[in-house]
Image: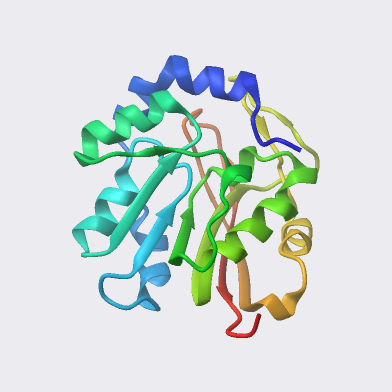
């Protein structure tokens, strides 16, 4: 199943400039534990980089960051911020093997259809080197749907998210925590944050 949702991509195409240019700081509280286990200069893939704020911060810290987004319009906006090429990549098109020390997916995999998510996580697992670190955040909920802006969200529970990661032996450890915050729509939101380390074993 494709992760491409025309209504969601259409929203980001129309709102790319406003979305990328909004007053949003990098996610320091989540970047800190993510990079804590990485060596200096580690290679990081960012999926769904949006305006590029998180990539910008990780580049500032000296990491070799590969920023990507599924929206060509947002990728173009991120290029303006970062001063470097930003790839256009849909989740299911990730095909690299053992290419990254870390994969950062802040508030992007939440747009993946529920049936497609386990396969996408499989691809991320494959793209990570043994011992590589994976971070992803999701809007919590009980059923998939659209927000007031027309964007699709999978709205997972913590249990559903853990199931999507598959065999627990692949990730040692996998931690999921929850907090409250907001997003582009400025609505109160429960967030799930997953931080996982690819097992050294195949």
The vertical placement of 150 against 199, above or below, is: above
State whether residue 157 appears in this view. yes
Q: What residue is shown at x 34% (from left), y 35% (from top)?
A: 51
On the image, which quarter does residue 7 sit in?
A: top right
Judge left or right: residue 85 versus residue 174: left
Q: Is residue 148 above or below residue 141?
A: above
Image spot of residue 42 (x, y percent): 33, 70
Q: Quadrant of the C terminus?
A: bottom right
The residue positioned farthest toward the top in the image shown: 14
**Coordinates of residue 43 in the picture (x, y in percent):** 35, 65
* In this view, 31 is above or below 36: above
Between 164 and 186, the one lying in front of the other is: 164
Left or right, residue 29 beside residue 135: left
User: At 33% from the left edge and 21% from the top edge, which residue is drawn?
Assistant: 17
Residue farthest bottom in this picture:
201
Name the image quarter holding residue 168. Answer: bottom right
Please name the residue shown 76% across and 38% down the image: 1
């Amino acid at each position: 199943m494709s992760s491409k949702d025309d209504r969601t991509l259409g929203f980001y195409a129309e709102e790319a400039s406003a979305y990328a240019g909004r007053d949003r700081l990098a996610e320091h509280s989540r970047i800190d534990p993510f990079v804590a286990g990485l060596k200096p200069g580690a290679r990081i893939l960012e999926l769904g980089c949006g305006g590029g704020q998180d990539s910008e911060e990780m580049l500032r810290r000296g990491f070799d960051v590969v920023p990507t987004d599924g929206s060509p319009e947002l990728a173009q906006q991120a290029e303006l911020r970062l001063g470097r090429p930003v790839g256009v990549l849909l989740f299911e098109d990730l095909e690299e093997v053992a290419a990254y020390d870390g994969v950062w997916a802040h508030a992007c995999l939440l747009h993946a259809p529920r049936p497609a998510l386990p396969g996408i996580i499989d691809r991320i697992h494959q793209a990570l080197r043994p011992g590589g670190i994976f971070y992803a955040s999701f809007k919590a909920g009980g059923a998939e749907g659209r927000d007031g802006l027309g964007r699709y969200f999978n709205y997972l529970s913590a249990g559903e998210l853990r199931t999507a990661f598959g065999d627990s032996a692949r990730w040692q450890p996998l931690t999921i925590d929850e907090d409250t915050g907001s997003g582009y729509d400025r609505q109160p939101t429960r967030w799930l944050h997953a931080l996982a380390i690819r097992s050294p074993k195949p």
